[in-house]
Image (tube, grey):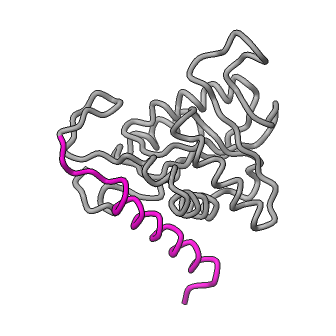
Amino acid sequence: MLTRHQYDDVVARDALVEHLKTHALRTDGPFTLRSGAVSSWYLDARQTTFDGQGAWVVGRAVYEVLAPEVEAVGGMTMGADPIAIATAMVAAEAGRALRAFSIRKTAKDHGTGGRLVGPIGTGAKVAILEDTTTTGGAAVEAARHALEEGLVIVQAIALVDRSDGLAASNFAVLGIPHVALATPFDLGVDA
């Protein structure tokens, strides 16, 4: 028998998968992925993460797998930003203080500069987020920079992992557990 928390986990994940399938999945390829690989399908996750209802579903699904010691969530800018904000908002609604942060692709030379943005500092326990991963490259780059900034990475979370285990292996090298909320199988497409 499922407990209430387990039930919520299943419902949140299923709602995420359904929203992605309905709004973000494209099967009219070919598409060239960030990794350079060519695929017959593409997941434009921003069709979900930038949508009001989709963002709520994303935040809920990520929150449900978030380790209890995590104090902040974020990752490489653009892909991780809406996921981090949505997750922090869902956490606030649940009474949990959770901050969001972003890692810029390059440092700015004006304002406060740097690559790390948000209310976060050395020693903070964080989760690195990513929308879709093919190799884990962008999220691993974000993780390496977070470590350089003195953050403590508790886990990495991808909305969809199409890497067939490569992303988890790349994070394992850094000693970071990797959680995928969905796989190509869940979306009804081939890896």
Look at the image and say whether residue 36 sits in the magenta stretch.
no
Image point 34% across, 61% down: which residue?
21
Image point 82% across, 32% down: which residue?
121
Q: Is residue 130 left or right of residue 47?
A: right
User: Which sits in the foreground, 178 or 183?
Assistant: 183
Q: From what the image shows, is residue 80 above or below residue 32?
A: below
Report how many numbered discs are placed on residues in the image: 0
User: Based on the displayed image, in which of its 4 quarters is residue 163 positioned?
Assistant: top left
Q: Main secondary structure of the magenta part?
A: helix
User: Based on the displayed image, in which of its 4 quarters is residue 126 positioned?
Assistant: top right
User: Which sits in the foreground, 124 or 171?
Assistant: 124
Which image quarter holds the N terminus?
bottom right
Q: Is residue 40 left or right of residue 60?
A: left
Look at the image and say whether residue 19 sits in the magenta stretch.
yes
Q: Is residue 173 left or right of residue 115?
A: left
Expressed as whole percent of the image width and height from the top left, the position of residue 71 reads 77, 48
Expressed as whole percent of the image width and height from the top left, the position of residue 154 reads 67, 45
Q: From what the image shows, is residue 154 above or below residue 96?
A: above
User: Based on the displayed image, in which of its 4 quarters is residue 76 positioned?
Assistant: top right
Expressed as whole percent of the image width and height from the top left, the position of residue 61 reads 56, 63
Q: Which residues are magenta?
A: 1-29
Image point 60% across, 27% down: which residue?
144
- Which residue in the rendered view is the most extreme toward the bottom? 1
Q: Is residue 61 left or right of residue 14?
A: right
